[in-house]
Amino acid sequence: RESQRKAPRRPAPPSSGSLASVPGGCDGGAGQLGTSSFAESSYEGMAAQSRKETCAEDAFVASNRQRANGWISECKPRLCLLKHERPYFVRIRQAEERRRKRTMWMYHHMPTMPFAAWCEMRRQEEAEEAAQLQSAIAGARVPNSSGKGSSSAR
């Protein structure tokens, strides 16, 4: 059964029973069954040059590349939309992606500091803040030197 599965299917033999009517048969393909012009041209090209040689030519590669690039440019989505022309969900997604990348870049490039040095720096900052707070409170509690009452325009 495996040999039957792997064997390629052969076309049914012609009804006349001779090979004369088969394209490429004993009479060179001039039998009763017609051949397409594409098949004839490919047979003629194959006789003159192998397919590998044909595909290796610069002109063939250039024309194939031009056809492929034309097809791709027709099928690809237009990417030159302005930001405000894009759909809302796309704008939100792109803004979120930019924000996430910026945050990750910041964390990645953040300078490192030993924890002990950070604690010492934080203690100094807290001490300075406490001193400023104390001076602000002390400045507000200074009694009025003019005596009783704060109204000077009597």
Image: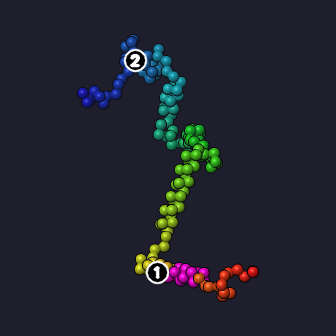
Q: How is the image coloured?
A: rainbow
**Image coordinates for residue 66, horizontal then vertical, percent:** 58, 41
Q: Quadrant of residue 85?
A: top right
State which quarter of the image contains the C terminus: bottom right
Q: Which residue is mark 1?
A: 123
Identify the residue at image location x=46%, y=74%: 112
Q: Which residue is mark 2?
A: 19
Q: Earlier in the sequence, mark 2 or mark 1?
A: 2
Identify the residue at image location x=51%, y=22%: 36
State which quarter of the image contains the N terminus: top left
Q: Which of pointers 2 and 1 indicates the residue nearer the eye?
A: 1
Q: Nearer the viewer, residue 84 or 1?
A: 84
The image shows residue 31, relative to residue 62, as above or below, that is above
The image shows residue 7, relative to residue 55, as above or below, that is above
**Image coordinates for residue 145, horizontal then vertical, percent:** 66, 88
Would residue 67 be visible to someone looking at this image? no
Q: Nearer the viewer, residue 122 or 25?
A: 122
Residue 123, magenta (yes or no)? no
From the viewer's perspective, tell me whether residue 4 is left or right of residue 47.
Answer: left
The part of the chain drawn in magenta is 127-140
Residue 139, magenta (yes or no)? yes
From the viewer's perspective, tell me whether residue 4 is left or right of residue 128.
Answer: left
Q: Quadrant of residue 57?
A: top right
Identified by mark 2, the residue type is Leu
Residue lying at the far top of the rendered structure: 16
